[in-house]
Amino acid sequence: MAGLNKVSVDDISVKGKKVLVRCDFNVPLKDGVITNDNRITAALPTIKKLVSDGGKVVLCSHLGKPKNGPEDKFSLAPVAKRLQELMEGVKVSFAKDDSVVGENAKSCVAAMNEGDIVLLENTRFRGSEETKNGEEFSKELAALVDNQVFVMDAFGSAHRAHASTAGVTKFVKETAVGYLMQKEIKYLGNAVEDPVRPFVAILGGAKVADKLNVISNLLEKCDTLIIGGGMAYTFLKAKGYEIGTSLVDDEKLDYCREMLEKADKLGKKLLLPVDTTIVKDFPDPIDAEVETSVVDSDKIPADYMGLDIGTKTAALYAEEVKSAKTVVWNGPMGVFENPILAKGTLAVAKALAETDATTVIGGGDSAAAVINLGFADKMTHISTGGGASLEYLEGKVLPGIDVIADK
């Protein structure tokens, strides 16, 4: 897997140099107020390191999905304010500039002293950020820091070949990864490529289609693959079971059969739910009270749907985790947004919290579940990237990592 030996911020000298840092400040906002600043605090170690080394630190990030160029509700102004509070005693200037690298940004950067911080406006205010013709924007970003240093620390955007994640590297002298990226590469990369065994991978979530390559790749790497969540019902149907009105991807039945055969051939354990929590109708709203019962996986009534793993399955999966030395988990076991249907996800989270194994949570919904259920501090590593961590688990090369210099 690419990226296990990249130049990091510890390997470069930035004193007196301008450094462009791509962060992931894509924080949730409500009425202009940040509701969760985890992504900002996660970026602090890299920023503080560059500041203390005497760099002139220019930060950039996207926020949300502005459709028509600059939109006030997607401005990074609230991020600048929060960053100033967290960087006690270090000046943080916000370069409000609709073209991101216009006159205001240029004058802010020109006025910098060693150890100063400038935050640029949302990179997606420039439509070219995500398009094939983003080269002009890449050049402008590089020129802003005198084509000197680029540090990539936004793992959540590393799977996208955008101007501010990959394009800019063509025009700077030095590139490195920040501490956050280093941690992601170390835990996600090593967990899959060089795991301490037994290695158990747990995959949940709704759709088989989202995880096709992940299932196939992990089967080759792990000792046991545990399947839960909505995607389990396609596997159960592939085995010939009645799954009632449960979520199913009929186009992927053959694929599921292939994976069951592949596990067999490779001598790997592939565990499916032995029982399931069923309901008559999907809860509306999603967290509404709902009447449930638990039945064996081959006894789902035709007019019921499975929305969580059952109690026997939760115990079986927890038992499997106990003997593991490395566990990677991506995707919840059921509709975890509903407390009644979160029991399977809770059981798996609890099992991971109680094991001595290296536990890596692969971003997205499973990260949200672990955090919401209060187990975050018991995990070895919780990935900051949803789509990026999935692609990494697939064994894909991520452009935002690939472009950084190797040691």
Image (cartoon, rainbow, N blue to C red):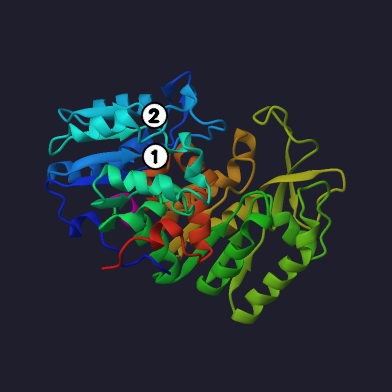
Which residues fall within the magenta stretch?
179-183
Left or right, 236 with respect to 159, comes to right
Quadrant of the rendered structure where residue 405 is? bottom left
Q: Residue furthest right?
A: 302
Q: Which residue is mark 2?
A: 76
Left or right, 365 with respect to 157, comes to right
User: Is residue 219 or residue 134 the one in the foreground?
Assistant: 134
The x and y percentages for residue 253 are: 78, 63
166 to 253, vertically: above or below? above
Is the residue marked by circle 1 packed among few (<14), some (14-19), or many (20+) residues within 10 Å? many
Residue 180 magenta-highlighted: yes
Give the residue type at disc 2.
Answer: Leu
Q: Quadrant of the N terminus?
A: bottom left
User: Is residue 247 or residue 90 the one in the foreground?
Assistant: 90
The x and y percentages for residue 247 are: 76, 48
Residue, x 50% and y 49% (percent of image)? 133
Q: Of marks 2 and 1, which one's residue comes earlier in the chain?
A: 1
